[in-house]
Image (cartoon, rainbow, N blue to C red):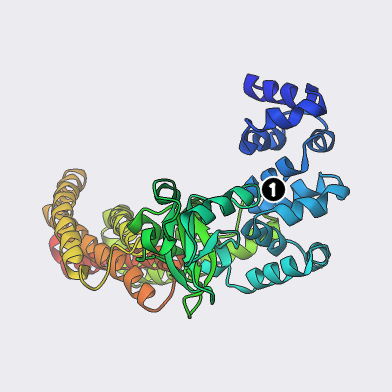
Amino acid sequence: MDDKKLNLYTQIFETPLYELEEILEFIHPADVLDLINDESIEFDRTVFLNRLPDWFLTELMNEEEEEDKVELLNQIAQSKHKTIIEEMASDELADMIGAMDLDQRHEIIANLDDEDQQEITKLLGYDPSTAGGIMQTEFINIYDNKTVGKVLKYLREIKDDVENAYTLFVVDRENHVKGSLTLEALVTSELDEHVMDIMNPNIISVNYKMDQEEIVLEFEKYNLALMPVVDDDNKILGVITFDDVIEVMKEEATEDILQLGGVHAEETVDSSVTDTIKSRLPWLVVNLFTAFIASSVITFFSDTISQVVAVAAIMPIISGIGGNTGTQTLTLITRSIALGELDDKNLWSSWLKELGAAIFNGIVLASLTGVLSYFINQNFTLGILVGIAMILNTLVAVVAGFFIPYFLNKLKIDPAISSGVFVTACTDISGFLLILGLTSLFIERII
């Protein structure tokens, strides 16, 4: 146990219960979770957790990763569950319930009061990858006819019940959003001023159906800490906070990396063997199919290979460099699409930039490959053909790496899912076809 965790453990475990509340005010729940989740440290976690007050256990549940919330809850005394669940942030509770099996889900929901049941059931009904699926319903809204003095009094009354009090939303009696109000604006205004006079009427909101990737772009564009979620009638439903957005960014980045490698986005190191097989096997089968297509090119030119054996050693170089070139372009374009940086307006300027880079890189690589091939095989014609095949396959690679993810995105298919397989197939097939085809055409000048 490192010193920080040892000190934290000692501080919490040995402090008398009547003093613990005061100490916990200055301890971040994330540090306690690090201690609890460190499997190298042996201690009775159930006893440790049940020393903590309910409000701090609620903070731990809110802070814990979605997939680990249920396990943490199961280590806490059953008698504390109802209080903790009722006090959890709505979005965190919905995430936890959504990860449970049906029996656990019904049991948890049944223990909530009618209002909370309706709220959670509604949250679970939203697509989890949309604004409605990641929003929380705890926020502060105030009517547009209130004065600053009344709002400040109201905030003091609810200070222990609502987080994210740094931005308030002004609504009418039908709950339509009229504007936003910051704490700075409140505390620097006269008490008799009306909120309608000091609010920001240019409210930036997102529709509950907006995809979470688009939400990240909105937060980045406007540099906000909090954004309201509205329905089709501009009535406020909830809010999305910057920590929700950070989670989405982490999730989307992980998903893209995994899918570029042909791995399902939900696979983790803790996934079962069956889930791992289901995640990976389909794309390996697709890859096998494309590999057979590439190998059929080699079979077709078997006579050429038997006459110019040196070309067999050159083929992997041509296809390999093409694959790397295509992957570089693919990675850039896939990420640009995800960030909203590539659209129809800058498509061709981006393409010309990639093409220019590919031509220059291809000439350099072709020159090096051709010269090295000449010195190794002592055949000038073969060296020239290798250089030509290299530059042409580099161009094929950049075309595939650029347009495959672009057109997949146009078809509403995540370009991260399958682009890598198809780009590799293109560069392998074209690489083999180019070097073997050119060699066949000029075989009499080579042998």
Q: Residues within 10 Å of mark 1 (few under 14, many from 20)?
A: many
* Residue at the far front in the pictured view: 192
Dot 1: what SS? helix
Horizontal side of residue 20 vs 183, given as left or right: right
Residue 278 location (% of width, % of height): 63, 65
The residue positioned farthest toward the right in the image shown: 79
In the picture, which quadrant includes the C terminus?
bottom left
Between 283 and 212, the residue placed more toward the observer is 212
Q: Where 364 sits versus 19, above or below? A: below
Q: Please state which of residues 279 and 184 is positioned toward the viewer in this rendering.
A: 184
Q: Residue at left 81%, top 44%?
A: 75
User: Where does the image place residue 326, in percent across and percent down from the top left?
Assistant: 30, 59
- Say left or right for 433 vs 273: left
Residue at x 61% of width, y 35% of height: 28
Horizontal side of 211 relative to 35 (left or right) equals left
Asked whether the viewer can see residue 252, the reply is no
In the rendered image, which quarter contains the N terminus?
top right
Given residues 279 and 6, the one toward you in this image is: 6
Q: Is residue 43 left or right of residue 118?
A: right
Residue 153: x and y, percent? 57, 51
Residue behind mark 1: 61
**Amino acid residing under circle 1:** Met
Q: Residue at x 55, y 59 (%)?
A: 140
